[in-house]
Amino acid sequence: MRQLLVLAASVAAILALLTAACSNGDEPSEQAATDSQQAQAEQTQSPQTDASAQPDGAPGPLKIAFLGDLTGGLAEIGVEMRDGFLLAIKQINAAGGVFGQPVEFVIGDTNTDPTIAIEEARRMIEIEGAHVIVGAHSSTNSLAVAESITGPAGIPQISPASSSPQLAVAADNDFLFRATLNDKVQGPALAQLVSEQGYTNVGVIYRDDAWGQGIADSFAEAFVETWAGQVVKVAVAPQQTTYLSEIQRSLQNEPEALVMLAYVPEGTIILRESIENELYDRFVFGPTSRNPSLMEAIGPEHLGDMHGTAPGTAPGTESALLWESAFIEEYERPYGFPYTKQAYDAAVAFALAAEAAGSTDGAAIRDQLRRIGGAPGLVVLADIGSIRLGLEAARNGEDIDYEGAAQSLEWDENGDLARGFVGIWRFTAQGGIEDTGVIPYGE
């Protein structure tokens, strides 16, 4: 009888193990928020998915999170940033993955809301097991996540798009980096453009958040001190139905043009009311206005030949050309928004840093980020073959110089880029957007 009981217990234990194994085998290795993202996940799977094939003691798969504005006022830009991120995941895995295993990913949507951004970051780290985060998009969201979640948790975070000067002094325990220039650089570049357009007296309407305040202050300081201009700044809150009173307040010095630093939803209203009430007919734009939706809403008859600035990319480099070709091949269209390349670069940087660290530990990855982004070292381009060589070199302890799709990622002590470009663009009379040049920084 005792033998029968022992046998029954053994059978039950075996069945339990088999059930657990089957359950684990059914879970996808990549987390996706939509059917299209799941399709991307299936495309990025590597043939080597059996963890038992890894050497004893090897770290588990690296999981990279993307946190962006897939809905809300920045959704058009955020969705394409996600596409750039997914292209990076696919190419990293085609290059052999990290630690010889496919990189996994998880997607989070902030809806341009810092409260949701914090909740999503917590979910992706605590529930989904993300080791690093590419994001967030807006400066307000990146600051909230860095100071509430990633900094205290020791999770490295690279924002492709957050440019507020506040990020450089955030309480983030040195876990927050960015792949775009600080607005202390972008603001003076915008001031230079405004002066070159022949304006000496302008009104500025800016979104009342970390990004808008930062770039408006940086612009105004440079325009007054360097270009001897006059400025009247007026802050606006999002989601208002009218901005007529704010526009009128910006007119107190009889400006020649309006510098607009707002997202597309409020920017559309500001432009329409300015034109319909004959308050402004000349405009200069910040980076968030480089969007076809704004042209479609207002029309080329009003915006044609109006200029603006946006994060630039290294012009005509081999890395940029390789990436642009790969993006077209993957999505059957060219990229159209700022920060798409930067989202790609952030994901590749994390892969190289994790391989160099030989670990998924946040502090270990963070400590390698500054080693893989600048000279000297093996130059790595935004290309599958080059990424493969870069991962091998990082694994062997060699220095890496990642020359990204957008630019090199040479980070200073604050996680800011030491070099980069500010792009100049214009709306065309035919209703398009044309890039016309770049202003280099730190070259």
Image (cartoon, grey):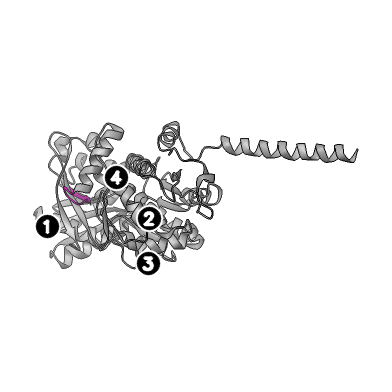
- Spatial distance from mark 3 to mark 2, Cα to Cα? 15 Å
- Residue under circle 3? 169
Q: Is residue 177 magenta?
A: no
| Rendered image quadrant of residue 74 | top left
- Residue under circle 4? 385
Where residue 89 appears, as percent x and y from the top left, is 38, 43
* Picture layout, residue 364 above or below residue 74: below
| Rendered image quadrant of residue 356 | bottom left
Q: Amino acid at mark 3?
A: Val
Q: Residue furthest right?
A: 1
- Residue under circle 2? 158
- Spatial distance from mark 1 to mark 4, Cα to Cα? 44 Å
In the image: residue 244, left or right of residue 432: right
Q: Amino acid at mark 4?
A: Gly
Judge depth for marks 1 and 2 and give the one in front. 2
Q: Amino acid at mark 1?
A: Ser
Graded by Cα atoms within 10 Å as few (under 14), some (14 to 19) or many (20 or more), the crowding at tag 2 reads: many
